[in-house]
Image (spheres, rainbow, N blue to C red):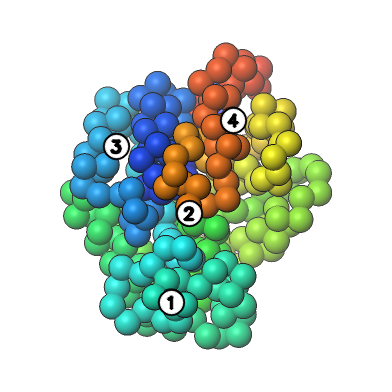
Amino acid sequence: MKRIWLVADDYGISKSVNRAIRDLLSEGRLSATSVMTPAPAFDNEEARLLSESVRASGRAIGLHLTLTSPFGPLSLGYRPTQRNKFLPLGKTFAAALLGHLDRDALAAEIRTQIKTFVGAFGRPPDFIDGHQHVQLLPPVADSLLDVMQTETPKAWVRQCGRAPDARGFDSKAVILDMLSRSFRQRAAQRGVRTNAAFAGTYSFRADAKFENLFPKFLDSLPDGGLVMCHPGIVDDTLVALDPLTTLREREYDYFRSADFTAALSARAVTLR
């Protein structure tokens, strides 16, 4: 049997998404979730409910490092910003390439998000990943990995490179492959562990059929690989913050279905 990570991103983005993720964790249909500490639906009560959901199962809880709008920084003096919020993803990417991301400000924000996590859960995160994969951008990567060495020495970090024999062309996956090569090297130099391989990207179009996509994610994934997912239930808060809405409900319904467990069984895969 191959043991893989199935990780739900975005805990904290809305209470309905939180509830859906907790349902799946309680039913043993996820390995873990990662928490957006700057998001509007994350507080001590939502942290308590999540802790209760994973207590019996031993599932992991990570930090979903958030550095893009429409969310705002938790630390004072973070820069650059736009209307007191993080920059949008495109501008964040450009700022990283042009050397406009302030390393000290990045480190302070990362420490603050970790500190907020520890304050809510009473312990450091089991792992760290990034909203919209920001952890892979070189200046973010260097700041994050340096902070992890001192603040979360036992945690691992998500890299987003596919298995070498992964098939099919996906422009998003190709970009993540390229960024992840450098990211893995940076992590290895600092002794920070990463997942074996990554899957879960797809075009978030309205006609996407997740029930057909998910089994393909498993085909080339090795033991210790990770599949990213975004299950949830739509509410007004989610609609106001994120374009990924009804597809979250499709993922949620799929993971609760017999088709999901059949796909795992047919490929001799189990969840960590």
Q: Where is residue 205, by image quadrant?
A: top right
Checking the image for residue 83, the label placed there is: 1
Label located before the other in sequence (4 or 3)? 3
Check disc 2 and report the residue beneath it. 241
Q: CA distance from mark 1 to mark 3?
A: 32 Å
Checking the image for residue 250, the label placed there is: 4
Tag in front: 2 or 3: 2
Q: Residues within 10 Å of mark 4 (few under 14, many from 20)?
A: some
SS under mark 1: loop
Instruction: Indicate the amino acid at tag 1.
Output: Arg
Q: Residues within 10 Å of mark 3 (few under 14, many from 20)?
A: many
Q: Choose between 88 and 66: the one closer to the eye.
A: 88
Residue 172 in the image, given as x and y percentages of width and height: 70, 55
Tag in front: 4 or 3: 4
- Name above or below for residue 205 compared with residue 67: above
Label located before the other in sequence (4 or 2)? 2
Which quadrant would the C terminus be assigned to in this image? top left
SS under mark 4: helix
Check disc 3 and report the residue beneath it. 50
Label located before the other in sequence (4 or 1)? 1
Q: Where is residue 99, by image quadrant?
A: bottom right
Instruction: Indicate the amino acid at tag 3.
Output: Leu
Instruction: Indicate the amino acid at tag 2.
Output: Leu
Residue name at image x 81 percent, y 49 percent: 169
Q: CA distance from mark 4 to mark 1?
A: 34 Å
Do labels 4 and 1 touch, CB within 8 Å? no
Which quadrant would the N terminus be assigned to in this image? top right
